[in-house]
Amino acid sequence: MSGIQISGLLSNSSFDWKSVVDQLIQADGIPLRTLNKNKTDNTAKVDALAAIQTSLTDLQDSLQNLRAGDIFSARTVSSDTAGSTWRSSSVKGAAVGSYTVAVQTLATKARTDGAANVGSGLASTSTVSGLTVAGLNTAIPVSAGTFTVNGAQVTIAITDSLQDVFDRIATATGNNVTSAYDPTDDAVTLGAASGPVVLGAANDTSNFLQVLKLSNNGTGSTTSVAALGTLRPSSPLASGGFRTALAGLDGSGNGSFKLNGVAVSFNANTDTLNSLINRVNQAGAGVTLAYDSANDRVTLTNNSTGDIGQGLADTTGNLLSALGLTNGAGGSLARGKDAQFRINGGPLLTSRSNTLDAAAHGILGLSVTVNSETTQTLQVESDTASMQSAIQDVVDKFNAVQTLIENDTKITISGGSVTTSVLSDNHEVQAWAGKLQAMAFDPVTGATGAFKRLDDLGLDFNGTTGQLAIKDSAKLLNALSGAPDDVQKFFVNGSAGFVPAMYGYLTNVKSSDSSMKSNLSKQNTDLDTQIATLQARLDNERATLTTSFIAMLDAQSKAQSQQTYLTNTFFKSSSSG
């Protein structure tokens, strides 16, 4: 409503009272604008100090990397043999130098080879009419299909008996080729009445000849080259086809044995050879059990190399013996070998492992895994690339701090005009840059090695600026490659080296930075209160002035109306008289 009144009044008055109110408020608002400017300046200072704090933390992290990352003990190893497959596994802290390693013998694993043909034969007699093809306990199953004998094709089904197959061979060859099974040798023989026996054709689809280990020899007779029967790894041990019957188990089929003192239990009625192999290999005995179906034998191999033995013994039952692993059952231990080598032509050294480390050769920190009986010269050098990268990072972070402080505190004078920056009035911040430059330039009092100051390492300021630079890269490289320990002493010696001294100072600077930001934030909080109070006062003043001017203009309007009334009244009366 007041807006409507003001609009009406303004249309009837030439007096711009709103401008007067604005000017009065503008004049009275000078303190408020001062407060807002102070708050804006404080906020800019807080932001600038926060950016400097972040940069200080980055520099601290970079310094800490020199101290905590074993940078100066890092080494690289190279071989004089092109394409060498030897590999270094650990070289930190190794003495820099050249080492000629002559490997005479590689370390190998001890292995017990069980007796061959521990599985029972295909049959106990030469009569095989009741033995089906599907039931043959061969290393791999026979597949149905066709095979060829003397150019005649023979068809076989897995439901056929072995005798059925023999009969079909005879029929297909006009009774020229006959077949027989010998239970003593566990072998099949094919014999021709005339001419040689010729087996196989390019279009055979059954593997019968291969499974029975039959091959051409250019004569009139061919016999399986090895025993045919094997263990059945997927069947329970009790029916697994052992040539030596399992014995000595308890009434439920339980038995046990020990490998390197680790007890392994089994049940012949529920465990298979496959499950037994898995159990042994996970028992923590340090050995691996495996089954070779081609030779029908098991092997027991140490998991680690070296001339160390194996301890194995049946405790309940005779399973190890039935597997042919014990001495009495035909098992034989092939001893492992220790690696034998020389360093720089010195005495013959040995190692159980092919990883030759300080325990074997006495060179602290050097470890190399060899895989060939050759002589190679290894060059152990400082990892100068990693060291220089870490130092360059410190330089970069240092320069970033200097750049921030310089930009935030500089005062520029041009043609009589002075331009300030956000922290130009903060002499403490300016002093931080100077102190850091002094710490980078002055000698380190706690350094105990050959290097006392950054300049000794080829680092210096870039001209007259506060920016560090690697001015002499060759000087730095020589120091890092030739005296890495002294470089480490310079940077990280106890609490007095370059890194701990600068790191500690930066911690104090960050604390001061945080205090400044906190004080400025508190000032802004107080300013917010003052600003709110002044703004409320100005709002109230504007409302009061507005009300007063409206009342004045309203009174003026009424006076004008009365004057008009009187004028019209008296003017008409005078005219009529």
Image (tube, grey):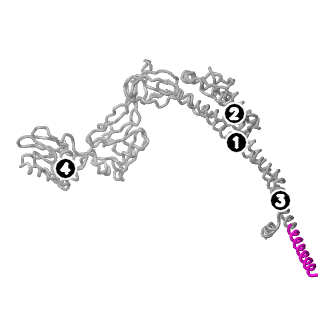
Distance Cα–Cα, label 1 vs label 4: 85 Å
**Residue ID for mark 1:** 48
Residue flagged by tag 2: what amino acid is it? Gly
Q: Earlier in the sequence, mark 1 or mark 4?
A: 1
Q: Where residue 223 appears, x then y in whole percent?
A: 15, 41
Distance Cα–Cα, label 3 vs label 4: 112 Å
Q: What segment is highlighted magenta in the picture?
A: 553-577
Distance Cα–Cα, label 1 vs label 2: 22 Å
Circle 4 residues within 10 Å: few <14, some 14–19, many ≥20:
many
Distance Cα–Cα, label 2 vs label 3: 59 Å
**Residues under numbered marks 1 and 2 in contact, where contact means CB atoms less than 8 Å apart:** no
Which disc is residue 341 wearing?
none
**Residue ID for mark 2:** 504
Distance Cα–Cα, label 4 vs label 2: 82 Å
Magenta segment, prevailing SS (helix, strand or loop) = helix
Residue flagged by tag 4: what amino acid is it? Ser
Q: Which of label 1 and label 3 is nearer to you?
A: 3
Circle 2 residues within 10 Å: few <14, some 14–19, many ≥20:
few
**Residue ID for mark 3:** 21
Q: Which of label 3 and label 4 is nearer to you?
A: 3
Residue flagged by tag 3: what amino acid is it? Val
Whether residue 557 is in magenta: the answer is: yes
Residue 256 lies in what quarter of the image? Answer: top left
**Residue ID for mark 4:** 206
- The quadrant the N terminus occupies is bottom right
